[in-house]
């Protein structure tokens, strides 16, 4: 028993150093975990934005591809400019006052 106590007395500084190092390491580990969670959240948000940008790009590519289609051009002229092809009857509605 006396020999075991002598061993602890001679190595007390190593035990104290280990405890101090552990007390410093645990808060740093928590901070690192918090930063990692923040980075995971930012990555998920950027992936959402990327998917939205890809969908918008596909829509724009389809719009560009359809602009050479005569049926699409006719539909745009009718919808946006109010033009109608020959032989169609154009009807105007007026608001009642």
Image (tube, rainbow, N blue to C red):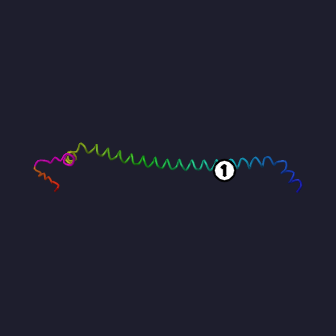
Quarter of the N terminus within the rendering: bottom right
Residue 33 drawn in magenta: no
In depth, the one of 97 and 80 nearer the eye is 97
Magenta residues? 76-86
Point 52% across, 49% down: residue: 40
Point 37% across, 48% down: residue: 55
Point 71% across, 47% down: residue: 21
In depth, the one of 27 and 3 nearer the eye is 27
- Is 96 located above or below residue 51 in the figure? below
**Residue linked to disc 1:** 26
- Give the side of residue 93 with respect to residue 45, left or right: left
Quarter of the C terminus within the rendering: bottom left
Residue 83 drawn in magenta: yes
Q: How many marks overall?
A: 1
Location of residue 14 in the rendering, given as x and y in whole percent from the top left corner: 78, 47
- Under circle 1, the secondary element is helix
Location of residue 90 in the rendering, given as x and y in whole percent from the top left corner: 13, 51
- Give the side of residue 30 with respect to residue 96, left or right: right
Location of residue 29 in the rendering, given as x and y in whole percent from the top left corner: 63, 49
- Residue ranking furthest to the front: 97
- Give the side of residue 17 with respect to residue 75, left or right: right
- Residue ranking furthest to the left: 87
Crowding at mark 1 (Cα within 10 Å: few <14, some 14-19, many 20+) = few
Point 16% across, 46% down: residue: 83
- Give the side of residue 80 with respect to residue 21, left or right: left
């Amino acid at each position: 028993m006396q020999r075991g106590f002598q061993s602890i007395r001679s190595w007390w500084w190593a035990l104290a150093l280990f405890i101090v190092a552990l007390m410093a390491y645990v808060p740093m580990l928590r901070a690192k975990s918090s930063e990692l969670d923040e980075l995971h959240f930012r990555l998920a948000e950027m992936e959402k934005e990327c998917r939205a940008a890809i969908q918008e790009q596909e829509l724009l590519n389809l719009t560009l591809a359809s602009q050479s289609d005569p049926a699409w051009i006719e539909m745009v002229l009718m919808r946006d400019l109010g033009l109608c092809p020959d032989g169609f009857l154009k009807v105007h509605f007026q608001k009642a006052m």
